[in-house]
Image (spheres, rainbow, N blue to C red):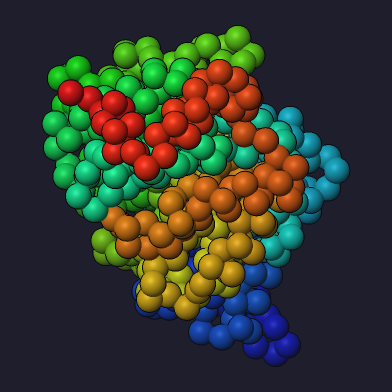
Amino acid sequence: MEYSHTLGSVRHSFASLSHLLACATPFRSGDALAGLAAASAEQRAAAQFALADVPLRRFLEEQVVPYEMDEVTRLIVDTHDAEAFATVASLTVGEFRDWLLSDDATAERIGSLSPGLTPEMVAAVSKLMRVQDLIQVASRVHVVTRFRTTVGLAGRLSTRLQPNHPADDATGIAASIVDGLLLGSGDAVIGINPVSDNPATVTHLLQMIEGVRERYSIPAQSCVLAHITTQIKAIEQGAPLDLLFQSIAGTEAANASFGINIALLQEGHEAAQALQRGGVCADGLVGSNVMYFETGQGSALSANAHRGTGGRGVDQQTLEARAYAVARHFDPMLVNTVVGFIGPEYLYDGKQIMRAALEDHFCGKLLGLPMGCDICYTNHAEADQDDMDALLTLLGAAGINYIMGVPGADDVMLNYQSTSFHDALYVRRILGLQPAPEFEAWLKGSGFARLSREMASNTGALDGMLERLLPA
């Protein structure tokens, strides 16, 4: 179906829904690289006008990636909740934007609507929104998940403690864990990116975190971000696994490039659920959200897996939103857009990274996901830590569930720049936010006091303290 809009005397036509979505997207380098970006600001404005007039129902009738060729599309279509969608079924994309910005769009109404929204619908409406709109709507939505801590409550901001080491050195990792805990980080997850992707490494690192957690009675969950097949093997070998991790994307072909499909994710989900390692949280509920997913705009394009209906490419932001449909299917504990990690080929500078992060957070929240963000950039991007400070503050105001805590904001294993333990303290203080309730209680209790006391008594002998934390 063709879409069009006339600006002045010029009629701008768009050959398909995917073409319209791509041209309506605020400019970013990845879409230009793929040949999908609007040719001019005028064409982009015309596409946004045309998109505003598209009925939401149209997204159920015209798929940007063919149903018969893509299991992500089949998941989106086959699990769509028509009853939930009925409340907005008569609206266009522009009218949906107006509704979301109205007082009628309460947290409860948006939450009940989420199962009826498709990723393409929320991607479309995000393209019509200013930064303040993305923040305003997302800030109303609180998606709460539980394992040993409760993440996503209003007035709370959690962190992933990310103690990576370029050689998987257990002493170095333990030192970073202690550093993060003493600075109030780790209530979302203590998550390590391993250098070596094998079950023995995964098991060893999980045992180390388990030892620290038990020694100081820490209400936290652990994760080693190996491939899902490696983690499943580690489970079979008796590893104390809490959250099961996997990177995901918005097309079947992109997921295949990661070595996964929906059936494999289901297998992993069932294996992690069977361990029943979740704790009793502050509200008396037992934590049962066990999946941790990471995504990023540009992942499908980087794998040449961004093609849609008619062979035309699909813009990277729409494909990112489609990844959230995969995540939503598994009721995850954490979803994290690693927004600037793939590089400037996809998000060129701080401005593009900022816009993309706020879009991702908005779209994920509308789809009912517990969104976090790795506020980050690579060293060859046109961005710096001032850009990240601005984005951190905006995401804090938007109600982000969690951010990263990396020693010094410099990941020495993955070689990129993120946010530090101190950055989390800053945004909590400036916005009046607290950690997860279970973790907040721990920080005020005997477990944290013991950690602080042992750290103080081992001044100058840190290695001896850390040796006691390492598994035999």
Residue 118 percent across, percent down from the top left: 53, 43
Q: Nearer the viewer, residue 224 or 87?
A: 224
Residue 408 as seen in the image, left or right of residue 89? left
Relative to 356, say whether 72 is above or below: above
User: Which residue of the protein is positioned furthest toward the right in this rendering?
Assistant: 103
What is the quadrant of the C terminus in the image?
top left
Q: Nearer the viewer, residue 315 or 401?
A: 401
| Residue 10 makes an appearance in the image | yes
* Count of labels in the image: 0
User: Which residue of the protein is positioned furthest toward the bottom in this rendering?
Assistant: 9
Residue 458 percent across, percent down from the top left: 40, 34
Q: Nearer the viewer, residue 140 or 174?
A: 174
Quarter where residue 97 is shown? bottom right
Residue 120 as seen in the image, left or right of residue 213? right
Q: Nearer the viewer, residue 394 or 136?
A: 394
Residue occupying the point 24% across, 38% down: 170
Residue occupying the point 29% across, 38% down: 463
Relative to 34, say whether 316 is above or below: above
Residue 85 as seen in the image, left or right of residue 39? right
| Residue 332 makes an appearance in the image | no
Relative to 360, say whether 178 is above or below: above
Quarter where residue 224 is shown? top left
Residue 362 percent across, percent down from the top left: 61, 50
Residue 34 percent across, percent down from the top left: 36, 74
Residue occupying the point 48% across, 34% down: 456
Relative to 220, say whether 30 is above or below: below
